[in-house]
Amino acid sequence: MNELAQLRVLHPGWRDVVEVFVVAYALYRILRLFHGTRTLQIVSGMGMLLAIYTAAWILKLEMITYLLSFVFQYGAIALLVVFAPELRAALAHLGQARFAGLFRQMEQREVAEEIGEAIERLSRSGIGAIVAIEREVPLDGYSESGSPVEAKVSADLLTTIFTPYSPLHDGAVLVRGDTIIAAGCILPLSQRSMIDRTLGTRHRAALGLSDETDALVVVVSEERATISVAERGQLRLDLTPAGVRDILAGRATQPAALPTAGVPA
């Protein structure tokens, strides 16, 4: 390393600071997109393989080193296949962030009205329901457990899906933007202790998904016909349809002041 390079390391310039912030932000966005998906599990497995390869190289275990180097050599092609859904979702989110920002608020209000109307109908009829609205963390891993729908969000369609004895009523509906991407989906159940013992499986599933992702999950209780919203590991109970619309449209103020049912694990 020459003297100029040493001087730059000791006295970084504004370009170095910008590069560090750009790379850090990019890594943060990538981790946000992959959080709560199978990708992190795969990355953890790759990390273990890399650690094994490093240990084998240090200990001069030639057979293990050769086999793992062969795996890494052709692993790039396999990764493109394995991560294809996550890559598509990441590019879709990038496109939305750059080109759909002007229309997001309008779309959000329309979707909030449709979901709010459906939730109000279901609550009046005493029909249980759970609707998860995707934000930045893709829900593709959870949509695979249900049936693909790919239909525009509407109160009529949501009400029909959750009608008792319909094929898709016993599960969650996943919403991305203004589109229902899947129905009848199975969500992870929260292992938290619940203050209200009358809360059932739907509320635990809503909390479980909100623990693992940044999704907003709306629940209608079949037993009590009440409406709840799970967000960031907290469950807000006994909401009105108007309150749900405000939360979905981003108009709700001080959401932390609303009652919660989940307690820290």
Image: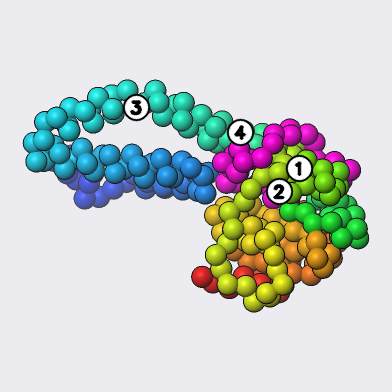
Q: Please, which residue is most extreme toward the bottom here?
A: 195
Q: Is residue 20 left or right of residue 186?
A: left
Nearer the observer, 244 or 75: 75
Q: Select label 1 or label 4 by which is in front.
A: 1
The secondary element bearing badge 4 is classed as: helix
**Looking at the picture, which amino acid does disc 3 mark?**
Gly
Q: Which residue is mark 3?
A: 75
Which comes sooner in the sequence, label 4 or label 3? 3
Report how far apart the C-alphas of labels 3 and 2 lie in the structure: 36 Å
Q: Secondary structure at mark 2?
A: loop
Q: Amino acid at mark 1?
A: Leu
Label whose residue precedes the other's in the sequence (3 or 1): 3
For disc 2, the neighbor class at 10 Å (few under 14, some 14 to 19, many from 20) is many
Q: Report whether residue 243 is seen.
A: no
**Magenta stretch bounds:** 131-158
Earlier-in-chain disc, 4 versus 2: 4
Q: CA distance from mark 1 to mark 2?
A: 7 Å
Q: Are marks 3 and 2 in contact (CB under 8 Å)?
A: no
User: Mark on residue 92?
Assistant: 4
At 87% across and 60% down in the image, what residue appears? 126
The numbered mark, 3 or 2, whose residue comes first in the sequence reads 3
Which one is nearer the viewer's eye here, 20 or 142?
142
Q: Which residue is mark 1?
A: 168
Task: Quote the CA–CA distance across marks 4 and 2.
Answer: 26 Å
* Among numbered discs 1 and 4, the one appearing first in the sequence: 4
At which x and y percent is residue 144? 61, 38
- Mark 4 against mark 2, which lies toward the viewer? 2
Q: Is 149 above or below relative to 108?
A: above
Label 4 sits on what residue type?
Ala
Whether residues under marks 1 and 2 lie with C-beta atoms below 8 angstroms apart, the answer is yes
Label 3 environment density (alpha carbons within 10 Å; few <14, some 14–19, many ≥20): some
